Image (cartoon, grey):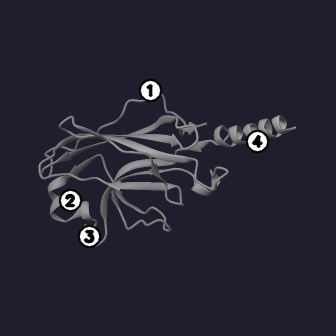
């Protein structure tokens, strides 16, 4: 009898961990308004080219651009309440890897989403870090520790207004439906 109960408990745990699908809604980089844990993500401006001199001088990396705007990268998925494990913890977390214009990279540890299903981090730049930035987004399953890449955000920075407007597109082949992770 104990074996049957243990097996039943194991199957329920397995189904809870693997049976939940996470769907990407949006990712990007740009100016956002104050977005705390209990608020909705408010995107003020997204773009493919940014003047980091303007952003730096107006405090965008500190959340002071035009009053309360922050230059940040974000990821949006479903609300966390839809994906809880048997301990009441959200199953899905996220990680990111940022590649700076000079080729250096930084990879984050797994981070929880806010209750509304989004998260963001301030994009920090030093004075003349010009070029192409790439942010790769990964979904991390707290139960299985599996990691899946779900999106890539690419943008360009200049020091001062560019003479031409750059438009960078990530080649993904055919248009893909929103990413789903099982």
Residue 173's tag is 1
Single out the mark in the foreground, 3 or 4: 4
Label 1 element class: loop
**Number of numbered discs on residues:** 4
Q: Are marks 2 and 4 in contact (CB under 8 Å)?
A: no
How far, Cα to Cα, is label 2 from label 1? 33 Å
Q: Do the residues labelled 3 and 2 touch (CB within 8 Å)?
A: no
Give the answer, above or below, for where 90 lies relative to 21. below
For image coordinates 64% across by 49% down, the residue present is 85
Q: On the picture, is 96 further left or further right than 160? A: right
Within 10 angstroms of label 2, few (less than 14), some, or many (20 or more) residues?
many
Give the answer, above or below, for where 42 lies relative to 113. below
How far, Cα to Cα, is label 3 from label 4? 54 Å
Residue hosting label 3: 66
Q: Quadrant of residue 108?
A: top left
For image coordinates 45% across by 40% down, the residue present is 138
Residue 55's tag is 2
Residue hosting label 4: 9
**First of labels 3, 1 by sequence position:** 3
**First of labels 2, 4 by sequence position:** 4
Q: Position of residue 140 (x, y in %)?
A: 50, 41
Label 4 element class: helix
Q: On the picture, is 28 further left or further right than 56? A: right
Q: Where is residue 60 in the image (x, y as percent from the top left)?
A: 24, 62
Single out the mark in the foreground, 2 or 4: 4
Label 3 element class: loop
Within 10 angstroms of label 1, few (less than 14), some, or many (20 or more) residues?
few
Q: On the picture, is 121 further left or further right than 141? A: left
**First of labels 3, 2 by sequence position:** 2
How far, Cα to Cα, is label 4 from label 1? 43 Å
For image coordinates 47% across by 48% down, the residue present is 26
């Amino acid at each position: 009898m104990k074996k049957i109960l243990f097996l039943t408990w194991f199957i329920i745990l397995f189904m809870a961990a693997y049976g939940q699908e996470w769907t990407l809604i949006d990712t990007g980089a740009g100016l956002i308004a104050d977005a705390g844990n209990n608020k909705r993500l408010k995107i003020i401006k997204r773009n493919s080219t940014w003047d980091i001199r303007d952003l730096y001088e107006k405090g965008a990396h500190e959340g002071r651009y035009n009053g309360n705007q922050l230059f940040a990268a974000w990821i949006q998925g479903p609300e966390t309440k839809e994906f809880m494990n048997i301990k009441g913890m959200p199953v899905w977390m996220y990680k990111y890897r940022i590649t700076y214009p000079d080729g250096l990279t930084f990879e984050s540890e797994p981070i929880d989403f806010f209750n509304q299903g989004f998260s963001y981090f301030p994009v920090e730049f030093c004075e003349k870090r010009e070029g192409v930035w790439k942010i790769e987004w990964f979904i991390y399953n707290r139960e299985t520790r599996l990691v899946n890449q779900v999106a890539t955000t690419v943008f360009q920075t200049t020091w001062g207004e560019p003479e031409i407007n750059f438009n960078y597109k990530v080649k993904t082949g055919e248009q893909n439906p929103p990413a789903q992770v099982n």
